[in-house]
Image (cartoon, helix red, strand yellow):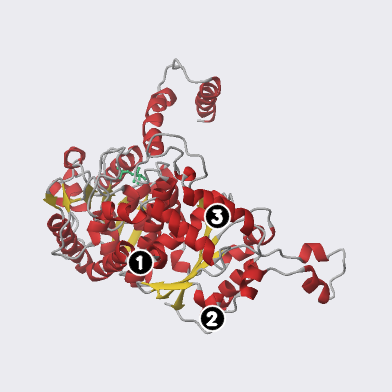
Amino acid sequence: MTNESQAWKNLETHYQKLREVHLRRLFADDPKRGERMTLKAAGLFLDYSKNRVTDETLELLFALAEESRLQERIGAMFTGDKINFTEGRAVLHTALRMPRGSSVTVDGNNVIPEVQAVLDRMTEFADRVRSGAWKGHTGKRIRNVINIGIGGSDLGPVMAYEALRFYSDRNLTFRFVSNVDGTDLAEAVRDLDPAETLFIVSSKTFTTLETITNAKAARAWLVEGLGNNEQAVARHFVAVSTNATEVKKFGIDTSNMFEFWDWVGGRYSMCSAIGLSTMIAIGPDNFRALLRGMHEMDEHFRTAPIARNLPALIGLLGIWYTSFFGAATAAVLPYDQYLKRFPAYLQQLTMESNGKYVTRAGQRVGYDTCPIYWGEPGTNGQHSFYQLIHQGTRLIPCDFIAFAQPLNPVGQQHDLLIANLCAQSEALAFGKTKEEVEAEGTPAWLAPHRVFDGNRPSNTIFAERLAPQSLGKLVALYEHAVFTQGVIWNIDSFDQWGVELGKVLARRIVPELSSPAEPDLSHDSSTNNLIRYYRRLKKETA
Ligand code: G6Q
């Protein structure tokens, strides 16, 4: 067990010493701390000096990584070992971004040529849509692209589209439909001409209830809008999936299917064919740049010693707060409007991967695993929930993310934005003492309210500018930080039995809600009552 290892015990003892030490003292003791505790790798700069750590803490965390055989496990992932052992699968999203000519074998087969062949097909298709060569059923060019998918088949594409919108073809409209709530599709198509609309049905399994339901409704909308002609489907629907049989059954020509493989986890799939909408939006060259960025971070993670390894360091700092300080949540605060969906994307990546209470050996963990991730872009969050980060009763480690160059320079606004970021991390770390508050002439009764304890940790990540390549690096950075944590917590970061559960539960209740005859219910009394109440209310209000 991880928490029985010597390294873990040393960290527990060390925590008792360090928990009362203030960042003010750590900075005062080492005037160069802010310069020393930084790391630049693959073009990303990390300032980790405002963390509640000393050199000793870091050494102990590195020892923990070593005892957990992190480096060996990294090697196992990259070489295609079946590290997702509960599903008997390799975990090879890194192979999706390897250069042509590389080699990675799964079950004796080099997968890189297949990966590159799919990328080439995506490129050809994206070029045809972007140039107008791909025509809809009535001969009109495509102007709207709608990705239908959910979870990993949605969050990556939406996040990447929003993040890279600056680079997108503005003559095309992109929308993303995920929720089985009919409103999602209705609002997405209400102002669109079916003759100019292309649907990408993205589903690894092609059996996911939400996606297939939405895809069927989209097909009905299209067919009806184009003179009830089923033939129209072929020019307006393409699929991204691992399941050719189901794609064919749905009525999509498999020559319009873009394949990926069971060794790509849903939440790790934005760099696979699931990224087709991204490629159409930003163009194949930009998509390749995104992959290059990811690969650069992959190589850094694979080869750098743990002490100079950016994802490992971020992962270990997260462990320090979660498992030792007991921090229940972590905030991700991008100071870039284009990254507004990045926290939502990270929520799935982190929590679906490491939201587990069973170790690889099948025992219950004896420590806290994944915290709750949340966040909003700065500066908006400052006017709402930052209050709690500054003066609330909980410790919330923060990741600030920013870029040196704005994509839309407007006057001094970028400096204003970054000034806010620097001010926040400074205030969180150092706070404001009673003496400082009183020296400002604040009356004694008011002073306690205006005191800030500080000692609230944060990382700051800077990159040059938001671009496909830098986004790729950021995404891979967090993917590997999550991997690092999964190794240390000794859990399978790549299965998602909680999600699978949801996929079967609702199916059972659907007929109970819609059957004309009163159904025989055998749930618990609350669920039975909710079903009856809903049926009655539906009838009364129809
Ligand atoms: C991701 C999860 C999950 C999955 C969705 C959609 O890692 O497995 O979020 O992506 O449930 O699944 P399909 O792509 O099979 O429709």
Left or right: residue 310 compared with residue 36: left
Q: Do the residues under discs 2 and 3 have CB atoms within 8 angstroms?
A: no
Element carrying mark 2: helix
Image quarter of residue 41: bottom left
For discs 1 and 2, the disc positioned in front in the rendered view? 1
How many C-alpha atoms fall within 10 Å of the one at disc 1: few (<14), some, or many (≥20)?
Answer: many
Where is residue 84 drawn, in percent x and y? 30, 43
The residue that disc 1 covers is 473
Q: Amino acid at mark 2?
A: Asp
Q: Nearer the viewer, residue 97 or 219?
A: 97
The residue that disc 2 covers is 415
N-terminal-most mark, 2 or 3: 3
Q: Do the residues under discs 3 and 1 have CB atoms within 8 angstroms?
A: no
Position above or below: 320 against 230: below
Q: Nearer the viewer, residue 328 or 488?
A: 488
Left or right: residue 348 compared with residue 261: right
Residue 501 in sight: yes
The residue that disc 3 covers is 321
For discs 3 and 1, the disc positioned in front in the rendered view? 3
Which residue is at 55% across, 76% downward?
Answer: 34
Q: Amino acid at mark 1?
A: Lys
State the CA–CA distance, disc 1 to disc 2. Answer: 24 Å
For discs 2 and 3, the disc positioned in front in the rendered view? 3
